[in-house]
Amino acid sequence: MTTGGPRGPGRWSGAGRLVLLPCLLAAGLTGSPVLGQAAPPGPHEDIAFDVMNVLAHHGLHDLEDEWWNAYGQTTYISSWKLPFTAPYTNLNGSPNSLIPERERSFTWSATLFLGAKLWAGGEAYFVPEVIALRPLSNLHGLSGTIQNFELQKGGSETPQLYRARLYLRQTIGFGGAPLKLDSQPMQLGATVDSRRLVIWAGNFSVLDVIDKNGVTGDPRQTFFNMAFMTHGAFDFMADARGYTYGAAVELYWDDWAVRFVHAAPPQNPNQLEIDFRFWKYFGDQLEIEHRHTLFGLPGAVRLLGYRNRVFSGSFDDAVAAFEADPARNAAACTDFNYGSTNATAPDLCWVRKDNVKLGIGIALEQFVARDIGLFLRVMYADGQSEVVAFNAPDRSLSLGAVARGGLWDRPFDVTGIGLGLSWISASHARYLALGGVDGFIGDGALRQATEGVFEVFYSFNLFKAIWLAGDVQLIWNPANNADRGGPVLVLGAKVHAEF
């Protein structure tokens, strides 16, 4: 959730750094500068008054060779869940159902992005953030279709100030064609080689490096639902806010890129405190990307794999422990657990140990017109153990289209339509059917089904760098449970401003 929950960046034109600023997630995620150079042409007039442009206009700042920059954003999202019918809710003390009554959720965030050049190719970035939030049903009852990507685990309605990122980045050029990188959040304006090595170290989001999509872009400008932020089954390393500590390496070679991230997990699944024993517990994420041009329009293919070595619970182990000794049930847990009081159910707290979790996915994006892009993401994870840092699904698929309003003479408006689906493994389903819970779902019983969301949004550029957006989401089979199939209708509204 900006799990970023945990819980991305537009590349529409040369003015995109002002129009679709890449901001966080949780996640707050940067865009791919390389793909951005190939993005379809668009209007070039700037529509935002920002510090960097004012200084550049007066000759006090060079946007093409920056020594520092500063950007910011603020976003307010409100969601209204309408009532739906369900035969049971939180059965036998299992606490993770989506409440069927009417509910309202909100998030408010404000972020400052500060960057500085330290030496040739060396940069430092510092990103403080404030967030306040109220989730639906205490962030329970949805597997991969959490309705607001900015929701965080363990957040509060009282605004909280924290450091989201503090990291160093070094770029080493190997030649090739010169590429201009636009000034934007977490990117100094510069010219780099098309063949280069980029090294990261510090406090950042894995999604700053991995799975940067040029169509869905920054979720603060596009889809509300977390199903479209990244792969739903991508259990990338993060604390409860969506950030981690680690190192990353990116190798760009013309149209190809390879990215690797080694990052730390939370001490306990889905919690805030990070386990800094990098040598013992970690997540490794590897992505191979190829960018291409099809009929004169840009696209990309990305293959992503991850391997997590973490302290977590296996679903099969929890079931076996409970069947061998019913006293090892959810209600009797004294170690870290998710608060179930179901004395007739297994629980992961009894069986946490060193486990390995694997996943592989593919992402496709393609512009089919100057202002229309399509995307597809598919991922398969092994589904043997609990999620430790992202969302509940073990397999996921999302697809859709995003269009800019140049087609109807509203060049800075954005609209989109998307479908997100998620599944759980047989082991995961058996554990939930017996009344077990994980970090997000567990109704006390289960009739396994595909959870899905259909979403439509429209973002209206009101004035300069201010957008108003409306959103409709239809969610079915929440928590992968056909017994509580809904459908659930969620209406959303967003105010977003950038500088």
Image: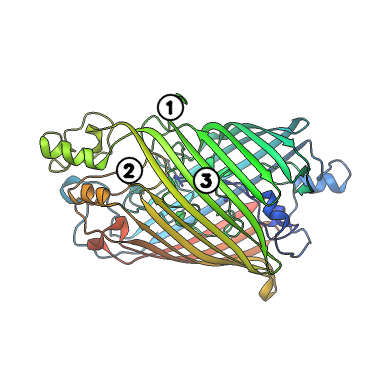
Q: Is residue 499 visible?
A: no
The answer to whether residue 43 is left or right of residue 492 is right
Q: Give the distance between the C-alpha atoms of the residues marked 2 and 1, in whole angstroms.
A: 18 Å
For numbered disc 2, what is the local secondary structure? loop
Percent from the top left, x then y, of residue 211? 55, 49
The amino acid beneath tag 1 is Asp
Percent from the top left, x then y, of residue 303? 52, 51
Percent from the top left, x then y, of residue 53? 79, 48
The residue where tag 3 is placed is 27
Percent from the top left, x then y, of residue 96? 27, 48
For numbered disc 1, what is the local secondary structure? loop
The answer to whether residue 373 is left or right of residue 397 is right
The residue where tag 2 is placed is 439
Which of the two residues, 57 or 353, is positioned nearer the viewer here?
Answer: 353
Does the residue at mark 2 contact the one at mark 3 (Cβ under 8 Å)?
A: no
For numbered disc 3, what is the local secondary structure? loop
> Which of the two discs, 2 and 1, sits closer to the camera?
1
Q: Quadrant of residue 202?
A: top right
**Between discs 3 and 1, the one toward the N terminus:** 3
Q: Give the distance between the C-alpha atoms of the residues marked 3 and 1, in whole angstroms.
A: 20 Å
Q: Could you tell me which residue is drawn at 13 percent across and 40 percent down?
A: 343
Crowd band around label 2 with a 10 angstrom C-alpha radius: few (<14), some (14–19), many (20+):
many
Which of the two residues, 302 or 437, is positioned nearer the viewer here?
Answer: 302
The residue where tag 1 is placed is 275
On screen, 224 above or below 415?
above
Which of the two residues, 80 or 24, is positioned nearer the viewer here?
Answer: 24
Which of the two residues, 152 or 399, is positioned nearer the viewer here?
Answer: 399
| Residue 406 image label | none
Q: Quadrant of residue 111?
A: top right
Q: Quadrant of residue 487?
A: bottom left
Q: Is residue 228 visible?
A: yes
The amino acid beneath tag 2 is Gly
